[in-house]
Amino acid sequence: MTAGVPVQCVVVRDQDGVVAIGRDDLVRYAGPGQIVATALCLRLFARAFADLSPEGPPHRDDIRVLVGFPGAGILDCVEMITRARTRGRLTVDPEAGPPDAPAAIVGRFYFEIAVGSRASGYWLADGYFTDAFVDQIRRHQDGQGTREELAAYQIAKHTVIGRLLGAPDDALFHSRKVHMP
């Protein structure tokens, strides 16, 4: 939700033109088990691109990314949007980020994104990934559990997605300027 408008897609430039990537594209790439990661990454990159490339869509080759949470869905979304993993511009560091960045199963929900010489670190505000939700992820992300537990997990995932997609930018992420090599 940049400037009060719900985010529909992120736009990047590539060698032969402009590519608009929507959440449906991210779900198709990362898989339906990664629907929360797709919502998080859509909002993250929309915010970062607005901050770091306000003059227009950044070129994929100019984007570098550090992730503090190396979840499969996050890494897939980063790859689809930026091609940073396959092109050597992705760093995974579960120790990165400020102490108040929310803990994940591994690492933290902290990200640094650079576009050219501009770079910022982003971390989720409190309350989006509660301890109870992270526990559900730990117990049910691989499809294990009773029918009722899995149904409750799907409801919880969609609740988090609604909150991620509906939150104003300033209520969703904290940010700070950083230096990325």
Image: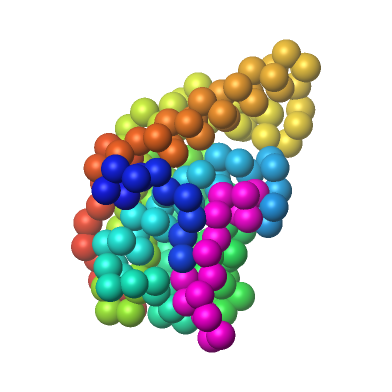
Asked which colour scheme the image uses, the reply is rainbow
Q: Left or right of 28: which side holds 45? A: left
Question: In which quadrant will I find the N terminus?
Answer: top left
Picture residue at 75% right of the left edge, 21% below the top: 145
Q: Left or right of 150: which side holds 52? A: left
Q: Left or right of 38: which side holds 103? A: left
Q: Position of residue 22 (x, y in %)?
A: 55, 54
Above or below residue 18? Residue 171 is above
Taking depth in this image into account, of 145 and 45 the one nearest to the observer is: 45
Q: Position of residue 115 (x, y in %)?
A: 35, 74
Quadrant assignment, res 36: top right
Residue 39 magenta-drawn? no
Q: How many marks?
A: 0
**Magenta stretch, residue numbers:** 12-27
Q: Left or right of 151: which side holds 94? A: left
Picture residue at 73% right of the left edge, 13% below the top: 148
Taking depth in this image into account, of 94 and 38 the one nearest to the observer is: 38
Quadrant assignment, res 64: bottom left
Above or below residue 129? Residue 181 is below
Question: Is any part of residue 110 visible from this angle?
Answer: yes
Residue 13 magenta-drawn? yes
Taking depth in this image into account, of 60 and 131 the one nearest to the observer is: 60
Q: Position of residue 176 (x, y in %)?
A: 22, 56
Picture residue at 27% right of the left edge, 48% below the top: 3
Question: In which quadrant will I find the C terminus?
Answer: bottom left
Residue extending furthest toward the bottom: 15
Q: Position of residue 61 (x, y in %)?
A: 47, 81
Question: Is any part of residue 120 visible from this angle?
Answer: no
Above or below residue 1? Residue 64 is below
Above or below residue 26? Residue 150 is above
